[in-house]
Image (cartoon, rainbow, N blue to C red):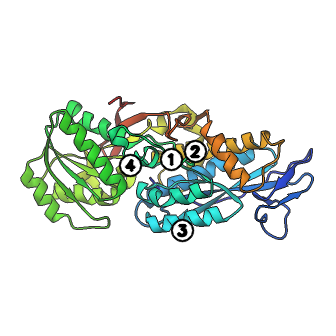
Amino acid sequence: MRHRSLLILTTVLTTGALTLTACGSRSDDKGGTGGSGGSSTSAAKNVTVVIGVDAPLTGQNSATGLGLQYGAQIAVDDANSKNLVPGVTFKIEAKDDKAQPATGQQNATAFTSDNNVIAAIGPLNSSVAVSMQQVFATANMVEISPANTNPALTQGKDWATGKKVRPFPTYFRTATTDANQGGFAGDYAFNTLKKKSAYVVDDKQTYGAGLAGIFKEKFSSLGGKIAGTDHVNTGDNDYSTLVTKIKNSHADMVYYGGQYDESELITKQLKAAGVKIPLMGGDGMYSTTYIKTAGPAAEGDLVTSVGVPVATLKTATDFINAYKSKGYPGDYGTYGGYTYDATTAIIKAVKVVMDANGGKLPAMPDARKALVDAVQKTDLEGVAGHVSFDQFGDTTNKQLTVYQVKSGNWVAVKSGIYTG
């Protein structure tokens, strides 16, 4: 679910002629970026196309958010160095949403108002996505999240009843949904961990509450007992009342729907009170920051996360080496690979649009509109797996992994595809 920074590389087209339009700025322009809706024709010019990135770059969730920012940056650097789209230099513009929906909406408005920005990556948090989707849809701008998992974002508010309707044709994601993740966790807790009762807590946010509800439903359907439920506020630090409730419930485990910022403190205070039961959560908890903050109390805790461990994929070796060699901050392991793939999908779609337009990038807003169709038809092998989208804009890659803290590290204990 989460950050960013930028680096501009210039690739000069040395042969042929390319007619450039106002979707981006020419590399030798002295007067700023391209104008609104107009076009400029000039031989052998290079156009700069901006891809926006929105994530929490500071504050809560920032460790994971930085993984989004720099995952996108590496994809752009690779595309520019390989001249993946001749005549185009790609650039990342990152904006900090601070995990706040109102700020995310402001960022979406800023991106869509800038004629150099052709598409956007992000956000990290599903609650932020809710505030941004309409803004991007109105502007016919592609938005691909590598981290949002709430099913309603792609399948509509009535998805759980089987009535699935795609709300926004411009919204896509490379992460699978909580309908799969929550069920995968519930099945693992009951059938593999052999837990018979669970205390379920959420942070009242779109992602956390949705995920906790799906876990609860699955765990109960298998015969598990829900020992109690409760809610916390994001930013809370004192969980003594919650700990007392959990202790008195005699639950076998705690399931938490939310981010690592709160869960790392809950598990620490729980263990300090002598309640030696595991805390399990979703991909919002899957960060090294969780273990660093919780310390020894994190031992034995579990999470589910989308995909398979990126470090185990040969296709991700160059990506991981680049991230480490550049000394980028943040966590690439959770969504960095999915962000790289989402960014690459946009880059390759730009080439598809240009190829269909005689090698020229259409003027705005036509370029954005054409990109929506091109992204929908994405079919490529990414660093984190195959990248394509179904009729709802959801990824066709449904792989999930359960991780457990062992000897102070997240260790994959089960990977698979949830089938219901």
Q: Which residue is mark 4?
A: 157
Q: In the rendering, which numbered label is found on residue 106?
A: 3
Q: Earlier in the sequence, mark 1 or mark 2?
A: 1
Q: Is residue 33 left or right of residue 205?
A: right
Q: Which amino acid type is shown beneath numbered disc 4?
A: Lys
Q: Which residue is mark 2?
A: 342
Q: Is residue 151 left or right of residue 406?
A: right
| Label total for image | 4
Q: Nearer the viewer, residue 188 or 225?
A: 225
Q: Mark 4 to mark 2: distance in Å?
A: 25 Å
Where is residue 149? Give x, y as percent.
Answer: 41, 46
Dot in front, 3 or 4: 4
Secondary structure under the numbered disc 3 in the rendered image:
helix
- When the figure is inspected, residue 308 is found, relative to residue 154, above or below; the finding is above
Q: Nearer the viewer, residue 401 or 292?
A: 401
Q: Which residue is mark 1?
A: 146
Residue at position x 50%, y 40% from top? Answer: 392
Q: Residue furthest bottom?
A: 31
Where is residue 341? Give x, y as percent.
Answer: 58, 42
Where is residue 38? Give x, y as percent.
Answer: 81, 61
Q: Earlier in the sequence, mark 3 or mark 4?
A: 3
Q: Mark 1 to mark 2: distance in Å?
A: 7 Å
Where is residue 208? Give x, y as percent.
Answer: 32, 53
Viewport quadrant of the C terminus: top left
Q: Earlier in the sequence, mark 3 or mark 2?
A: 3
